[in-house]
Image (tube, rainbow, N blue to C red):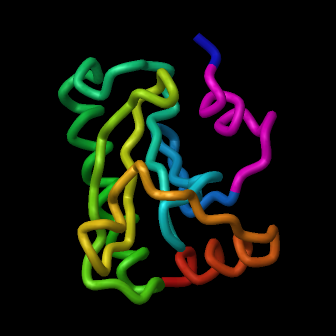
Amino acid sequence: MSTIFSKIINGEIPSYKIAENDKFVAFLDAMPLVKGHTLVVPKKEIDLIFDLDSEDYKELWAFTQEIAKQIKKAIACKRVGVAVVGLEVPHAHIHLVPLNTVDDLNFKNVRKVFTPEEYKEIQESITKA
């Protein structure tokens, strides 16, 4: 099951990585709801987040927590929202979305478009936080 996320993880598709370790990677969403919308993905190819073994599941959320803290420091927002939807790509992933209103986490919203320079600036602001 090679997904677009597997291709990002393997370096076959470029991305704006926020953080990475041996099990997980976080990168900016290519079709973000808002500035700073980040995806956290296990490197293991697995469709459903609840199919991760218990230890990997706990570690994924610990990694996600650290990324959310970085986003909160870097992006002006009231809080960082979390969503696990998993319908778009059959590879487990967590959405971290900077929120100022509840509507910021509405997946029916028109997605934002950023230039490569803007993505790089967002990436750098989060990685430095």
Q: Report the side of 117 relative to 64 (left or right).
A: right
Looking at the image, which residue sits at the far top? 1
Closer-to-camera residue (47/44): 47
The relative height of residue 37 versus residue 74 in the rendered view (above or below) is: above
Is residue 10 rendered magenta in the image? yes
In the image, 104: left or right of 15? left
* Apparent side of residue 101 relative to residue 3 in the rendered image (left or right): left
Question: Percent from the top left, x then y, of residue 68?
Answer: 34, 67
Front position in the image: 110 or 68: 110
Q: Residue at x 58, y 10 (%)?
A: 1
Q: Which residues are magenta?
A: 3-15
Q: Position of residue 124 (x, y in %)?
A: 65, 78
Name the residue located 81 percent from the left edge and 68 percent from the top edge. 116
Q: Tell me: residue 85, above or below residue 78.
A: above
Residue at the image position 42 percent from the left and 49 percent from the top: 108
Image point (62%, 77%), residue name: 122
Q: Is residue 43 magenta?
A: no
Q: Position of residue 33 (x, y in %)?
A: 48, 61
The picture places residue 72, in percent across and down from the top left corner, at: 36, 80
Would you identify the image quadrant in which residue 115 lies? bottom right
